[in-house]
Image (cartoon, rainbow, N blue to C red):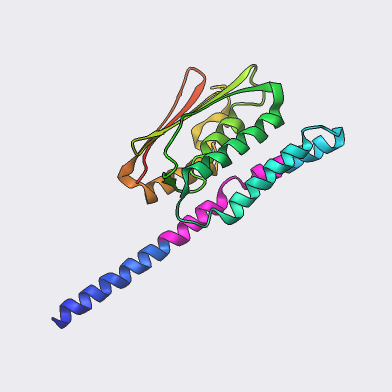
Amino acid sequence: MENERIAKEKERIDKEKENEHLKTELSFLRSQVSPHFMFNVLNNMVALARKKSDILEPSLIKLSSLLRYMLYETDEEKVLLEKEIDYLNSYIDLQSQRFGSKVKVNVTMDHFDNSYFIEPMLLIPFVENAFKHGTGLIQNAEINIELKAMNNLLQFTVINQHDNSSEETKDKTSGIGLQNVRRRLNLLYKDNHTLLITNRDNKFIVSLQLNLH
């Protein structure tokens, strides 16, 4: 009986250590997400201010909501999918303002159950990657973003054009963002997700299926 009690206690302690390690790693991974985006946006704000642009004020409001979400919501283990989508839309709006007519952005967000929860800032790296590698010197750049959530299943697709001949667009150098989100998916969703990333016909395609439980 004593040996059994000791074994159970050891198992409990090991489990607590494992959970603590997981929380620490997740906290670190979250802290890596998109920090340079904020610098890019702030630089864009400076440019808008110099031009005395009419979109400066709404851009600052959107930036404020992004910062509020990053500072106060992302410490939670899960957030409402609705909040994550609001953050995603604000990010897309800011980037659309930044690139203007240089990039055509098509967004489709289907209706979803407001009771769904998701790991915070899980989707944004895919969209950030699309803007990072799907713009620049590409003529008539276009980014397509589609999200559907129903019956506890989230389907998220991001498609962007890119130049296959460019070393910069290869997956191995697509940045911390995709490596980060892959690791978080494996830690939190394990067998409850499918992530497919393909590169063909000058298009980079991300397809994520996630069981929302």
What's the magenta region?
Answer: 22-41
Percent x, y of residue 43? 76, 41
Q: Residue furthest left?
A: 1
Q: What secondary structure is the magenta-colored segment mainly?
A: helix
Query: Residue placed at 16% from the left, 83% from the top?
Result: 2
The residue lying toward the viewer, choosing from 55 and 128, is 55
The residue lying toward the viewer, choosing from 210 and 55, is 55
Percent x, y of residue 157? 46, 29
Residue 36 sits inside the magenta stretch: yes
Q: How many numbered marks does the figure carry?
A: 0
Q: Residue furthest bottom?
A: 2
In this view, 33 is above or below 197: below
Q: In screen coordinates, is 131 left or right of 6?
A: right
The residue lying toward the viewer, choosing from 58 and 3, is 58
In this view, 205 is above or below 180: above
The quadrant of the rendering that contains the N terminus is bottom left
Residue 209 sits inside the magenta stretch: no
Q: In screen coordinates, is 80 left or right of 138?
A: left
The residue lying toward the viewer, choosing from 151 and 41, is 151
Query: Residue placed at 48% from the left, 17% from the top?
Result: 201
Query: Residue placed at 66% from the left, 26% from the top?
Result: 136
Query: For residue 38, which quarter of the picture?
Result: top right
Percent x, y of residue 8? 22, 73
Percent x, y of residue 139? 65, 17
Query: Residue placed at 61% from the left, 55% from the top?
Result: 71
